[in-house]
Amino acid sequence: MTLPRDSGAQFARFLHHRRQYSIPSGMARPDAFLPPKSKDETSVVEITRLPDESVWDMARYTLNAASGRACVLGRADFAAAASTSLGLVCARDDDGFCGHGTLSHWPTEPERRRQVALELCRLAKLKLAESPITC
């Protein structure tokens, strides 16, 4: 079951690779948000009213060495309203673990898709883990 979130809901995209963020700019990079070419959605987690420690604990649920996600290096936190303002749909589905959600309805044109991801990076807040989070 998919649950669309109200405008006050907060979500995070966990960052598994160094190329997904820039320390000098203090921002996630578009590749952090862009879905795989074969899909129209990106996995996110709802973090509304959760303390940081609980959010970092949730990161372990996203780890899967077979898919190249052996550690979590950081996260990009954003408001559901920010994604909605860009034409995306942010919804919690609890698929796999409580709090899991998706960011969907990405534009089909590659350049427009990248522009939306870049704007989401500007609206998101980058938070780096104190040390890499592993299984």
Image (spheres, rainbow, N blue to C red):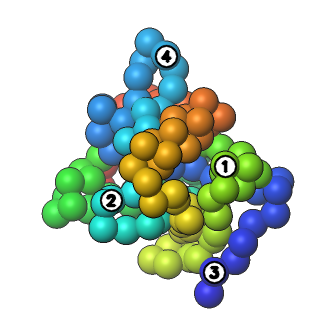
Q: Secondary structure at mark 1?
A: loop
Name the residue that disc number 2 marks.
36
Q: CA distance from mark 3 to mark 4?
A: 34 Å
Q: Earlier in the sequence, mark 2 or mark 4?
A: 4
Residue 112 in the figure: left or right of residue 60: right
Q: CA distance from mark 2 to mark 4?
A: 24 Å
Name the amino acid type tagged 4: Ser
Q: CA distance from mark 2 to mark 1?
A: 19 Å
Q: CA distance from mark 1 to mark 4?
A: 22 Å
Q: CA distance from mark 2 to mark 3?
A: 20 Å
Q: Give me the disc on residue 25.
A: 4
State the residue at coordinates (64%, 69%). Answer: 91
Query: Are there few (<14), some (14-19), or many (20+) residues within 10 Å of tag 2?
Result: few
Q: Secondary structure at mark 3?
A: loop
| Residues tagged 3 and 1 counted as in contact (Cβ below 8 A) | no
* Closer to viewer: mark 1 or mark 4: 1
Q: Earlier in the sequence, mark 3 or mark 1?
A: 3
| Residues tagged 2 and 3 counted as in contact (Cβ below 8 A) | no
